[in-house]
Image: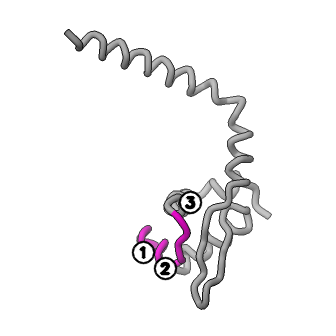
Amino acid sequence: MPTAYDVLALPLRREILDALRSGPSTVGELADGLGVPQPTVSKQLRILREGGFVEVRAEAQRRWYALRGEPFAEVAQWLEPYRWLWEERIDRLGSRLDEMQDEEQP
């Protein structure tokens, strides 16, 4: 089974995950939205499913793919010790923007 990091390594898989944030979709909907052939999307969905990032639900002849949260939690947990790297910068940016806004007000 691929690791979460193996699964996320391919940009197309990340694009598929981004597309699924708005809700469950079929292979055809994803392929149309991404401008990628259906067989390519199907292959990547299989890898996403094996990695635990998506689940599939059969409804008649259609297969609906939806996000699963567990692998994202694993990635977030791994990133936690590094959060200070960007939070400090975001805090400084917010402070600077506040200063700029104060300077512009009469």
Query: Which quadrant of the figure contains the N terminus?
Result: bottom right
Q: Which mark is residue 20?
A: none
Q: Could you tell me which residue is drawn at 57 percent across and 85 percent down?
A: 62
Bin the neighbour count of mark 3 within 10 Å (Cα to Cα): few under 14, some 14-19, many 20 and up: some
Q: Position of residue 10 (x, y in %)?
A: 59, 58
Residue located beneath label 1 in the image = 32
Name the residue furthest front. Answer: 106
Q: Position of residue 11 (x, y in %)?
A: 54, 57
**Badge 1 vs badge 2, beta-carbon distance below 8 Å:** yes
Q: Could you tell me which residue is drawn at 59 percent across and 76 percent down?
A: 64
In whole angstroms, how far apart are the C-alphas of marks 1 and 3? 15 Å
Q: Secondary structure at mark 2?
A: helix
Residue located beneath label 2 in the image = 28
Callout 2 amino acid? Gly
Q: Which residues are magenta?
A: 23-37
Q: Position of residue 21 (x, y in %)?
A: 53, 58
- To which quarter of the image does residue 75 belong? top right
Residue located beneath label 3 in the image = 17
Count of numbered circles in the view:
3
Q: Position of residue 59 (x, y in %)?
A: 61, 85
Q: Could you tell me which residue is drawn at 30 percent across and 12 percent down?
A: 102
Bin the neighbour count of mark 2 within 10 Å (Cα to Cα): few under 14, some 14-19, many 20 and up: some
**Badge 3 vs badge 2, beta-carbon distance below 8 Å:** no
In whole angstroms, how far apart are the C-alphas of marks 1 and 2? 6 Å
Callout 1 amino acid? Asp
Name the residue furthest bottom. Answer: 61
**Residue in the foreground of this view, choosing between 43 and 101:** 101
Identify whether 96 is placed above or below 63: above
Q: Is residue 2 left or right of residue 54?
A: right
In whole angstroms, how far apart are the C-alphas of marks 3 and 2? 15 Å
Callout 3 amino acid? Leu
Q: Secondary structure at mark 1?
A: helix
